[in-house]
Amino acid sequence: MYELPVYRVQLVREASLLVEQRAVRSPSSAANVIRKHLAGADREHLVVLMLDTKLKSIGISTIAVGTLNACMIHPREVFKPAVLHNAHGIIVAHNHPSGDPTPSPEDAEIAERLVKSGEILGISVQDVLIVGETKHYSFAAEGRLHSGNTRRAA
């Protein structure tokens, strides 16, 4: 006879973040939320901003903390909080502690992988952002997100 473990999966609220508005109206408004969440970060952090069907933010989660110039991620970790929170869509973002939000070839490759993964899961990747101290880069605004289920924030 084998004793099978029974598990319960849940999200646990760690804190709250005061933001100007719940609706994500543009890459700039999303970048401001991310920038506020990552204030003072001295290493790369990858975060997911979870969205409801009206593209209103319903939560933010830090997925990984890396080094000064790299952060290892896998789509399963990126989508885990979105699945648990029943999110309709996500905005994935990471900071560049150097302040320069120019994407690397690896940034573009992971953005493409995340969009494909989101299509399979039915969770739209609305944007992939790179946030610097005062500037940001939006893959969606630059036309570099290619998905049948991505709807731009109005």
Image (cartoon, helix red, strand yellow):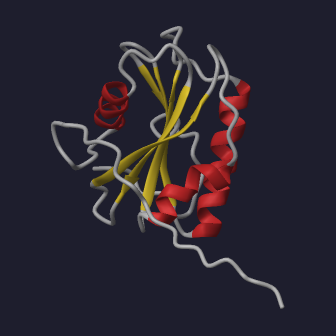
Residue 154 percent across, percent down from the top left = 27, 50
Residue 58 percent across, percent down from the top left = 30, 55
The image shows residue 143, relative to residue 85, as above or below, that is above
Residue 17 percent across, percent down from the top left = 25, 38
Q: How many marks?
A: 0
Q: Quarter of the image containing the N terminus? A: bottom right
Residue farthest toward the top in the current orientation of the protein:
98
Q: Is residue 110 left or right of residue 153?
A: right
Q: Is residue 7 left or right of residue 132?
A: right
Residue at image position (51%, 18%) is 101
Q: Is residue 58 left or right of residue 125?
A: left
Residue 141 percent across, percent down from the top left = 45, 36
Residue farthest toward the left in the current orientation of the protein:
20
The image shows residue 97, relative to residue 119, as above or below, that is above
Residue farthest toward the right in the current orientation of the protein:
1
Asked which quadrant contains residue 3, the reply is bottom right
Asked which quadrant contains residue 11, the reply is bottom left
Residue at image position (36%, 25%) is 35
Residue at image position (35%, 20%) is 39
